[in-house]
Amino acid sequence: MGKRKRREVEIVVLSDIHLGTYGCHAEELLRYLKTIKPKKVILNGDIIDMWQFSKRYWPKSHMQVVKQITSWLIKGVKVVYLPGNHDEMLRKFAGFRLSSFLIDNKVVLKLGDKKAWIFHGDVFDVTMRYSKWLAKLGAVGYDTLIHINTFVNWILKRLRREPISLSKRVKDSVKSAVKFINNFEQTAAEIAISNGYNYVVCGHIHHPEIKTIRTDKGEVMYLNSGDWVENLTALEYDGNDWSIYRYANDKVARSVKLSKRLRDKLDNEEIFRDLVNEFLVVKK
């Protein structure tokens, strides 16, 4: 970044990063993180993909994302980790607090005279609740599609063409997927309205969105932070309004230079050592 001034942001919401998988755009995320100066960071689930995690695949760029977040903790930035279905084992640590770091299942933020209800959203997924094995099988198929997508984009890059997201195209074209997204949004909105929240903020479905949903009982602003596999998006709150951040539209972040060594993989001992070192630094 050099002397380039970082953009100040009141709140950043990130979800569905899926570190540890081939589909994760860790380098792009790292470029974005290096351009901002947040006061609070909400990690809204599926940050590390423990379903698809493999010791054979953990590039340095993925560790650098972890290091960037821990560097914020050292500086006193509040970081809240709300586990999702792919990192659900962390839910057993709900309530754990260390310095400015907190793990919980949901959080309610007071934003002026309004309240924002934030959680991952997999609780609304019937497949997750009653057929977890089926959901995991679907995750394997999804990861295979990501592998194919990586190869396709490798070819497109050499043809000087823009990359594409096959998974996004499939979801956008399948009526059942569109219906699922609509039902998800409606369910979240109805519960938020019944509890008197002004905002409901989710992840999980990899579909960035900000819209007002009205029912006969009231209205609420529904927000979804999207993901860093298909859309490369986040939510930002500037102290007054929410907006969707899109990496594709951020010329500043895209111009950030990263070391080519970040594409290298870490061996198992390096992964463990780096994670322990990062934890000890925060603890101090």
Image (cartoon, helix red, strand yellow):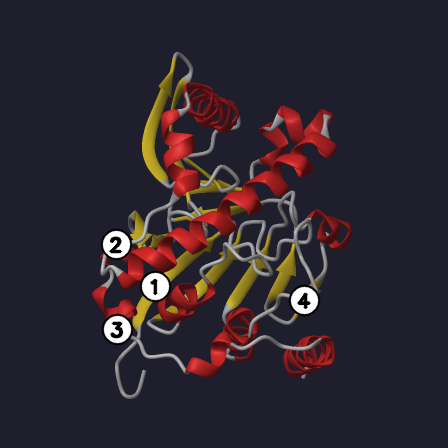
Q: Is disc 3 placed on a helix, strand or loop?
A: loop
Q: Residue at x 41, y 19 (%)?
A: 175
Q: Label 3 belongs to which residue? A: 255
Q: Earlier in the sequence, mark 3 or mark 2?
A: 2
Location of the N terminus (image quadrant): bottom left
Towards the viewer: 112 or 30: 30
Residue 166 occupies quadrant: top left
Which residue is labeled 2 in the image? 162
SS label for mark 2: loop
Does 158 sit left or right of 98 as displayed?
Answer: left
The residue tagged 4 is 56
Between discs 2 and 1, the one toward the N terminus: 1
Query: For this view, does 220 lie left or right of residue 41?
Result: left
Three-letter residue code for mark 4: Arg
Q: Residue 21: image x %, image y %?
A: 57, 57
Q: Amino acid at mark 2?
A: Glu
Question: Dividing the image into 4 quarters, which one contains the C terminus?
Answer: bottom right
Residue sitting at x 67%, y 66%: 56
- Work out whether 212 lies above or below 19: above
For this rendering, which residue is in front, 77 or 112?
77
- The CA distance from mark 3 to mark 2 is 16 Å
Which of marks 4 and 1 precedes in the sequence? 1
Residue 164 % position (x, y): 33, 48
Are dots 1 and 4 in contact, CB under 8 Å? no
| Residue under pointer 1 | 9
**Could you give the CA–CA distance between mark 2 and mark 4, rounded to whole angstroms?**
29 Å
Amino acid under disc 3: Ser
Question: Which mark is drawn over residue 275?
Answer: none
